[in-house]
Amino acid sequence: MSRPYPVPATAVAGVRGSRRPGPAGVGIAGTTRRWAVCPSLDGRKPRVPADRTTASRCVVRVPAKINLFLAVRGARPDGYHELTTVLQTVSVHDRVTATLVGPSERSQHPASRHRMRLELAEPDDEALPSGDANLAVRAARVLGRLAGLAALEGGASEGERDPRTLLELTKGIPVAGGMAGGSADAAAALVALNELWGCGLPRERLRDLGEEVGSDVPFCVIGGTALATGRGTSLARVLCRGQFHWVVVFDHEPLETPDVYRAWDAHCEPSEVEPDAVLQALRAEDALALGAALHNDLEPAAVALRPALADRKQALLDKGALGAVLSGSGPTLLALASDAEHARRLADDVRDLSAREPVVVSSPAGGPELKATTSSGPGHGRSS
Ligand SMILES: C[C@@](CO)(OP(=O)(O)O)[C@H](O)COP(=O)(O)OP(=O)(O)OC[C@H]1O[C@@H](n2ccc(N)nc2=O)[C@H](O)[C@@H]1O
Ligand SMILES: Nc1ncnc2c1ncn2[C@@H]1O[C@H](COP(=O)(O)OP(=O)(O)O)[C@@H](O)[C@H]1O
């Protein structure tokens, strides 16, 4: 059993101000928009923009993440673990579509956005949780609370004809695979609904809100490459030159993140390894050096739960990967190739390692992207 990691009071105190409305006269976006004060369920008076939002449908494409380096410094008193990790987005994507549904003259009226039900479309993957257990729905509630969307809180309906916000998820990222699929959907939901509901929050503010939903969500909101500390939510951007090419090897069964951290508690000790070699390799666009520097302290914990992962990782190295590492809490494994062509050959060579076909991806892959906005309301009705 490892010793608890001493955490400064500020680190466990909660989200930086995100539950509080801004000071009088300052909107949540910190801009000079006009604001209307709306009642919220818990008596606070968050502010929402009183502008006329015209979007009726927003589609956001969001990439998965991998951990190029992950050191666990110890268990914290709040149930999390203190980390140092280098995160990067990769070209495996989910898509989140947010649509205003209902009688058009009502759902398109700005006031309707203040009292609206939230619905998650039937997921196409049965491994996906429905309702509030889904991280995209949780993210929507966090933003809805800040924006004063009272009906989102209780989900109360005044009837089928009420306008509502429909969230639809199209999954490309494996569920519970260590690639932050749920967190990516939460990040995409924040970006899509920020647009759909006309909140006008800057990306940095959405990033801070993400902390209320999960440790990986703030990174998924900004994307790219970052060094994260604390429970994974204190982020600093990292310079990465060029692109890296990977083979992603999936597993047939998911691994749940809390189980892997519990296995770390049982089997591992805090480590002092630092990410300097990874950071240097990213700056230098040096795949060989990056392969040698890949590191994940959660690997022995995941292997304790799923012993076959050790042999699979060794097989990737034997087949010529520059390096191989568990993605986050696993069970997905990442094999680094020297270029795109090497990645394709490697993927062919490791086809037999798991039941699901390996995929070739590149990194970094940017952040959540607003792919389409369908406009409605006076003078609109077009897609962009
Ligand atoms: C391991 C990592 C590495 O990036 O990613 P995944 O493999 O899950 O993608 C993260 O630390 C996972 O982040 P995320 O999946 O967002 O975790 P959260 O929802 O915040 O927490 C789920 C549970 O994981 C454990 N947890 C998570 C983060 C952390 N720093 N310490 C922890 O001990 C806690 O038991 C927590 O209750
Ligand atoms: N939209 C979602 N997509 C995937 N998983 C989700 C989602 N919402 C909630 N989850 C749950 O979150 C947990 C972690 O899933 P995910 O983020 O995909 O993996 P990981 O934490 O391993 O990166 C799983 O138990 C999954 O059921």
Image (cartoon, rainbow, N blue to C red):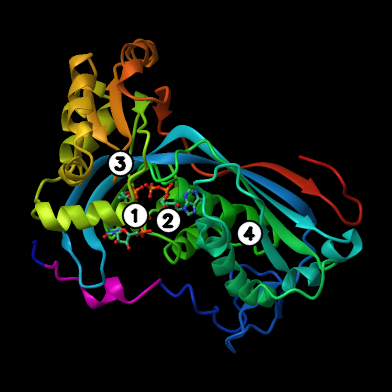
Which mark is nearer the camera, 2 or 3? 3
Residue at the image position 77 percent from the left and 57 percent from the top? 100
The type of residue carrying mark 2 is Pro
Mark 4 and mark 3 lie on one chain; the one further toward the N terminus is: 4
In the picture of the structure, the residue carrying the numbered disc 2 is: 218
Residue at the spot x=21%, y=60% of the render?
Answer: 82
Closest to the observer, 116 or 237: 116
Give the number of the disc on residue 28: none
The residue that mark 3 highlights is 330
Separation of marks 2 and 1 at Cα, in angstroms: 8 Å
Bounds of the magenta span? 4-15
- Secondary structure mainly formed by the magenta segment: loop
For mark 4, what is the residue? 194
Identify the element where label 3 is drawn: loop
Distance in Å between CA atoms under marks 2 and 4:
15 Å
Q: In which quarter of the image is residue 101?
A: bottom right
